[in-house]
Amino acid sequence: MNKDFFKYFGFDLLGCFSECGAKKDGILVIDNPEVLEGLLVEIAETNRLVPVSSSSEKFIPQGASALVCIAEDESQKPKVIANIGLETSHLAAHSWPESGILQVSLYTCDKNTDGRKVMFDIWDEVGARELVYRRIHRDGYFSADYVRRFELDEKGRKVCAKRRI
């Protein structure tokens, strides 16, 4: 067996935001690719991740996707970007505005990145009612996998849901 099989390679955090209602200039944030891309870049920077490149696309009749490739620190930032690929650390979002849904994927090798804070920062910007996320520890077995569900209470605070997922 490969000696690196059990090595820590990073973690994935997969989030689903529902009832996203925030608007900018009269357009849903999750239906505006440029706004969504800028939001991901800003949140990456706020959380001490280094955006290397970014891209976004608008889909017809609705929907948007945005991708930010990230380095964990400035020393890892490449001098030349040949292409955007998901083999690197990334923060990506895909929306279904007709359903109020935003799906987000964060992958990073940095053990110190607070993935929950990244998700909560996105939550604040898209005006979601609920967030469900799954964290997957990347090693040979994709081991420490767990799911958390949060919703807004009657006072608008984010609380961990008591119901089973």
Image: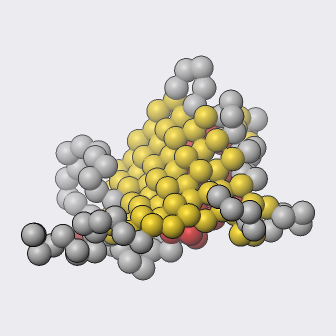
Place of residue 9 in the rendered image (x, y in percent of width and height, measured from the top left)? 27, 69
How many numbered marks have been drawn onto this rendered protein structure?
A: 0
Figure colour scheme:
secondary structure
Kindly identify the residue that appears in the image at 71 percent across and 55 percent down. Answer: 130
Image quadrant in which the C terminus is located: bottom right
Q: Position of residue 113 (x, y in %)?
A: 45, 74
Q: Residue furthest right?
A: 154
Residue drawn at x 45%, y 49% as measured from the top left: 92
Q: Is residue 33 left or right of residue 162?
A: left
Instruction: Tell me residue 106's x, y (percent).
Output: 44, 58
Q: Is residue 90 above or below residue 8?
A: above
**In this picture, residue 20 sits left or right of residue 61:** right
Q: Is residue 137 above or below residue 100?
A: below
Q: Determine the residue positioned at 29% across, 45% down.
A: 84
Q: In this view of the protein, can residue 45 be seen by the observer?
A: no
Asked where in the image residue 147 lies, by quadrant, the reply is bottom right
The single residue placed furthest to the bottom in the displayed view is 112
What's the residue at 64%, 41% (across, down)?
A: 101
- Res 161 → quadrant: bottom right
> x and y percent of residue 114 in the render?
50, 74
Q: Quadrant of the N terminus?
A: bottom left
- Of residue 16 and residue 35, the one placed in the foreground of this image is 16
In the rendered structure, the answer to whether residue 3 lies left or right of residue 153 reads left
Is there any visible trace of residue 131 in the rendered image?
yes
